[in-house]
Image: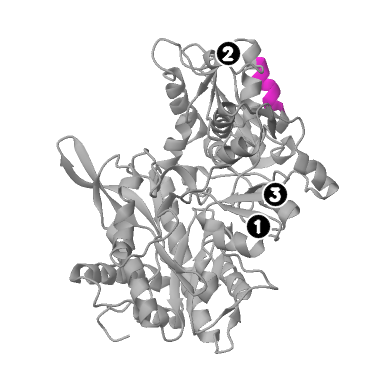
Amino acid sequence: FVILDLLQTVSRCTAAAATPPPPPPRLYTDARYFLQAASELPQEWTLVKSGTPGVAKLEEWLAEALGKGERVGIDPEVWSVSAVRAAAKALKVAGIRLVAVPHNLVDKVWGEKRPGMPRAAVRVHAGKLAGMGVAEKVAAVRGRMAAAGGTGNGGVDWLLVSMLDEVMWMTNLRGADVEFNPVALSYLMVPRSGLGALRLFIDPGKVAGGEVAAHLASEGVEVSPYEGVYGALREAAGRGERVWLDPASASWALLRAATLGEEKEELVEKEGGKVLLSTTPISLMKAKKNPAEMKGLETAHVLDGLALVDFFSWLEDNLTSAGLSEFEVGAQVDRCRAKQPGFIDPSFPTIAGCGPNGAIIHYHAQPTTCGLVTPTAPFLLDSGGQYLAGTTDITRTVHLGDPSPTHIECFTRVLQGNLALERAIFPENTPGHMLDSLARLPLWRVAKDYRHGTGHGVGAALNVHEGPHGISQRQNNTGLEPGMVVSIEPGYYEEGEFGIRIENVVAVEETGTAFGEKKFLRFRNLTMFPYQRKMIDLGLLSDEEVHYVDEYHRKVFETLAPSLNDAQRAWLKTNTAPLRDAC
């Protein structure tokens, strides 16, 4: 989100990340932001649609645009090791060097208007919600550190944790430094057994005194200033200690510190090198929710369902032919969630788009420029909440008037894709990209598709987007395992007309069946809110699909009804009635 603010300073656009080499200034972004960027970029900027056929990657364009011997400068603190290596390799072929600049040039232009470092307080994530203590997590990580890098090399001495959600998960803390994400700006250095204390690099003022200080002291965590991580890495390198970094999340500046500026291949990746570059074990450990985390997620989704019944019943009661501001409708969603116990914040900026704005995948309504929610077009609401117990993310598309046959067919095919994937049975460790086509097939049958992934991991009272797993057409070799939580969110979008997306969050669990030693898995829906019945074409659904939706709606009603008032309960009963009953 800091990158988004930087971008607004440079280009007045809010979509994705920019690289503006003059001339001309260019914005590189993926398909999620094509429509938004096209509408917000100043005329002098060129929009580069990354990932589309025939479009060169940033480093490929630079290699062609610049001459041999020229240099490309980057801020080493904001480029990951993986990104630097990919760019440097492409530029080297053209005789161009990638160099680290000592000061971020955009920050210099930004000047005094640049916000200071966030100073939000940190809180303890209760043990009954975390399910594991810090010592238990550290012991598991140290076991992997001892075996890291192959046999016979003695493992690694330190694991540097640079992903904020991984730091929070390891320490059972939560923060508020990054909007919508309960994380604090920090690093964590985990030592091998006997080498020293767990070291947390964070603004000391955030953790001084009270429950947080007592928690860290009891867990043997040593607190150091945030900026001290670079010195700690240099000291470890000076003592000949080996450090483990995740190349996808650790910055180039961290690698430079851990190698004392020497980044030759033999010092980094080979046996006995100063640094091991590999995904941290924490990513997978965090992704596989323990029973307490899963229970918290289930609780959060029930609370979310109650909030959405409150919201949609309010919307139906208050919408007139004059329409309601998309911005105000989005704010009402937040107000409905805020009534629920344990609600903290939205888990991401609410997407509330009607008609053509629903076709902008990551649309964000602004108070002075937003459109209206009216009864004449589909309304797409993608929203979520951060609760003490867990994190939610749900999308529902509804029509509050008379949907056209096109709206109904497209909605039904998106729903069929959702159902096909949600009902899938698959072998353990199946990567998400091998399942992605199940959600697209109903659309493919009529030559339609969508330009985004089908699902992302969801954190347990952490980031609404997490890895390492996911479901998309992009190859991701992380297999799905029991305890993982992922979204299923196919969609369909007609530019300038309407958008449809249906999203549930599901848990991966065992089926109790196996083929030899290979266990089979399935998804279990955590989301508790119905699909709009009048948008479903029963002629397209099979009997099995109708039965599955009816059973889901029955479960939603039984789960939510006891906590609703009479009017809300009546609304939910109507909206969860069997599909073949008259709407």
Front-most of 490 and 463?
A: 490
Q: Position of residue 317 (x, y in %)?
A: 51, 85
Q: Tell me the residue at 34%/78% (across/down).
A: 533
Label 1 or label 2, whichever comes before in sequence order: 1
Front-most of 199 and 548?
A: 548
Q: Tell me the residue at 39%/73% (across/down).
A: 561
Residue 336's place in the image compared with 470, above or below, is below
Q: Nearer the viewer, mark 3 or mark 2?
A: 3
Q: Which residue is mark 2?
A: 241
Q: Residues within 10 Å of mark 2 (few under 14, many from 20)?
A: some
Tally of numbered tags: 3
CA gap, disc 3 and disc 2: 46 Å
Q: Which residue is mark 1?
A: 14
Q: Say which quadrant the C terminus sits in.
A: bottom left
Residue 455's place in the image compared with 431, above or below, is below
Element assignment for label 3: loop
Q: Is residue 293 visible?
A: yes
**Amino acid at circle 3:** Pro
**Amino acid at circle 1:** Thr
Q: Tell me the residue at 57%/33% (across/down).
A: 87
Element assignment for label 1: loop
Q: Is residue 274 visible?
A: no
Q: Is residue 126 left or right of residue 545?
A: right
CA gap, disc 1 and disc 2: 42 Å
Label 3 or label 2, whichever comes before in sequence order: 3
CA gap, disc 1 and disc 3: 19 Å
The label on residue 24 is 3
**Magenta part of the chain:** 228-235
Residue 506's place in the image compared with 494, above or below, is above
